[in-house]
C-alpha cells in the first residue's frame, strides 16, 4: 500500500518514525505525470534504501513567467497507481499553499554553474529548484536522493549545492531512460504534436553523431555546429543551445575529463532537453 501524505507535519512524523527505527529513506523528487524515467529512479532507490518516498509537486518557483506551469500535465490518481505498482512506500503530494504559505523573500543563488545551458534562457530556474529541494529535503529527511541525468545540469547544480552547504543527503545519478526511437522520456512529450513527436528523435541522433565526431577528432566548435545543423534540418524546433562542457563542473571542457554534449530545442509549446556524456581519456 502506498501511503499518500499531503501535509508537511505528517510527512515529518512518518520520516522521523522510520529514522528512529534506523531505516534508510530513498527519496525521488518529481513533478508527477510519471513515466519509466521516474520509475527507474524508484528502482534505484529501492536497490539502495529501505523505504522509498516520492514527492509529486509542480513547483511554481522554478517556472519563469512565460513558461508552462499552468499547462504542465497533472494526474495524481494515475501517478498514485503507477507509484503503487513500482512499490513506492509513500507519496508526498503537498498543495502549493502547504509548501508556500508565505514568501519571506529569501533565495538561494546557485552561481555560475546555473548560468549556462538551461540557466541562460531560464535565469531563475535553478534558484527555484534549490529552494524547493532544500524545503523538501528538510521535510522528507531522506538519507539518499535520486536524480535523472536527463536533467544533467540539475544533477550538477544539486551535487554542488549539497557539497557546498553540507546537506546531509547522498545524491545518486540515474541514466536517461529513452523511448524505443531514442527520444528521452519526459512528462512534456505528451504536449508534442504528432508531427513534432515524429521529428523529436532527431535530437538524440544528432547528439550521438556529435559524440562520435568528437571521439574521432572533430573540434568542439565544429561538433556543436554539426549538432545544431542536424537538429535544425530534421525538426521544426528552434535551437535554444548546443553546449559541450566539462561534466559535472560545467567549466571549460578538456579531452581527459568527462564532458557533456547537451542541447535544448524549443517547439511552439514544448521545450525539449537532452544530452550525452562523453568519457574522458583518463576514464577510458
Ligand atoms: P520531473 O518530474 O520531470 O521534474 O523529473 C523528476 C526526476 O526524474 C528528475 O530527477 C529527472 O531528471 C528524472 N527524469 C525525468 N525524465 C527522465 C528520463 N527520461 N530518464 C531518467 N530520469 C528522468
Image: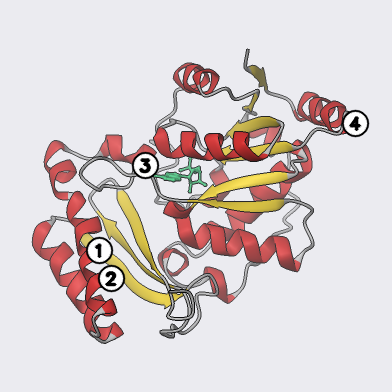
Tag of residue 208: 1
Do we see residue 108 in this rendering? no
Q: Secondary structure at mark 4?
A: helix
Q: Secondary structure at mark 1?
A: helix
Coloration of the structure image: secondary structure
The residue at which mark 4 appears reads as 20
The residue at which mark 3 appears reads as 186
Residue sitting at x 43%, y 80%: 281
The residue at which mark 2 appears reads as 211
Badge 4: how crowded within 10 Å, few (<14), some, or many (20+)?
Answer: few
Instruction: Check the image and report above or below for 49 versus 115.
Output: above
Determine the image quadrant of residue 158.
Answer: bottom right
Q: Is residue 136 left or right of residue 199?
A: right
Q: CA distance from mark 3 to mark 2?
A: 22 Å
Horizontal and vertical percent position of residue 247:
49, 71
Q: Return the disc, 3 or 4, that comes first in the chain's sequence.
A: 4
Amino acid at each position: 500500500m502506498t501511503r499518500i501524505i499531503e501535509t508537511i507535519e505528517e510527512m515529518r512524523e512518518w520520516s522521523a518514525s522510520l529514522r528512529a527505527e534506523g531505516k534508510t529513506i530513498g527519496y525521488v523528487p518529481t513533478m508527477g505525470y510519471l513515466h519509466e524515467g521516474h520509475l527507474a529512479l524508484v528502482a534505484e532507490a529501492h536497490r539502495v534504501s529501505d523505504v522509498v518516498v516520492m514527492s509529486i509537486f509542480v513547483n511554481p518557483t522554478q517556472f519563469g513567467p512565460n513558461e508552462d506551469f499552468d499547462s504542465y500535465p497533472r494526474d495524481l490518481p494515475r501517478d498514485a497507481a503507477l507509484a503503487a505498482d513500482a512499490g513506492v512506500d509513500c507519496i508526498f503530494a503537498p498543495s502549493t499553499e502547504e509548501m508556500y504559505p508565505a514568501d519571506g523573500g529569501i533565495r538561494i543563488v546557485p552561481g555560475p554553474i546555473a548560468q549556462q545551458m538551461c540557466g541562460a534562457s531560464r535565469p531563475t530556474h535553478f534558484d527555484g529548484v534549490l529552494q524547493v529541494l532544500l524545503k523538501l529535503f528538510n521535510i522528507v529527511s531522506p538519507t539518499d536522493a535520486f536524480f535523472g541525468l536527463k536533467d544533467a545540469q540539475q544533477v550538477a547544480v544539486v551535487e554542488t549545492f549539497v557539497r557546498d552547504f553540507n546537506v546531509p543527503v547522498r545524491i545518486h545519478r540515474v541514466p536517461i531512460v529513452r523511448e524505443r526511437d531514442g527520444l528521452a522520456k519526459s512528462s512534456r512529450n505528451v504536449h508534442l504534436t504528432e508531427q513534432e513527436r515524429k521529428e523529436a528523435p532527431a535530437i538524440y541522433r544528432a547528439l550521438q553523431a556529435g559524440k562520435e565526431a568528437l571521439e574521432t577528432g572533430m573540434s568542439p566548435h565544429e561538433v556543436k555546429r554539426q549538432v545544431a545543423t542536424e537538429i535544425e534540418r530534421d525538426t521544426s524546433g528552434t535551437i535554444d543551445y548546443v553546449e559541450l562542457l566539462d561534466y559535472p563542473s560545467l567549466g571549460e571542457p578538456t579531452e581527459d575529463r568527462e564532458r557533456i554534449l547537451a542541447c535544448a530545442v524549443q517547439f511552439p509549446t514544448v521545450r525539449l532537453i537532452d544530452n550525452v556524456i562523453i568519457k574522458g581519456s583518463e576514464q577510458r
